[in-house]
Amino acid sequence: MRKPRDFDADLKALEDKARRLKTRKVRQLGELVIATGADTLTADELAGALIVLAETKEAGEAWARRGVAFF
């Protein structure tokens, strides 16, 4: 007879994995902010700049080329 599946353990493992991935993403974004020198901006300035960038779709390819050149 097969052992019943422990759904609670599976769910906890998935939640732990999601938490680790979110932490990794936040850390990488922080490293990116520091690497680009954007850490010298105030939180309000950085948030405003990111909002403008997110709203502007036309220049995406040019930004991507510039990002590739940076790294």
Image: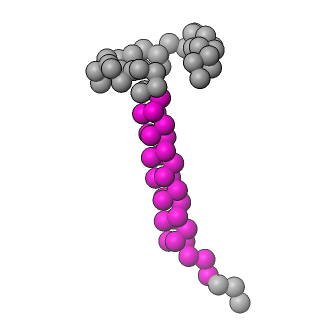
Snapshot quadrant of residue 61: top right
Count of number-bearing discs: 0
58 left or right, relative to 15: right
Q: Which quarter shows the C terminus?
A: top right
- Viewer-proximal residue among 7 and 66: 66
- Viewer-proximal residue among 69 and 52: 69
- Can residue 60 be spotted in the picture? no
At horizontal 39% and vertical 21% (from top left) the residue drawn is: 38
54 left or right, relative to 43: right
Image: 61 above or below 1:
above
Residue 32 in percent (x, y) is at 47, 29
At horizontal 62% and vertical 16% (from top left) the residue drawn is: 69
Furthest residue to the bottom? 1
Does the magenta run of residues contain 37? no
- Viewer-proximal residue among 23 and 1: 23
Snapshot quadrant of residue 64: top right
20 left or right, relative to 5: left
- Viewer-proximal residue among 25 and 14: 25
Residue 57 in percent (x, y) is at 55, 14
Residue 6 in percent (x, y) is at 56, 76
Residue span colored magenta: 4-32
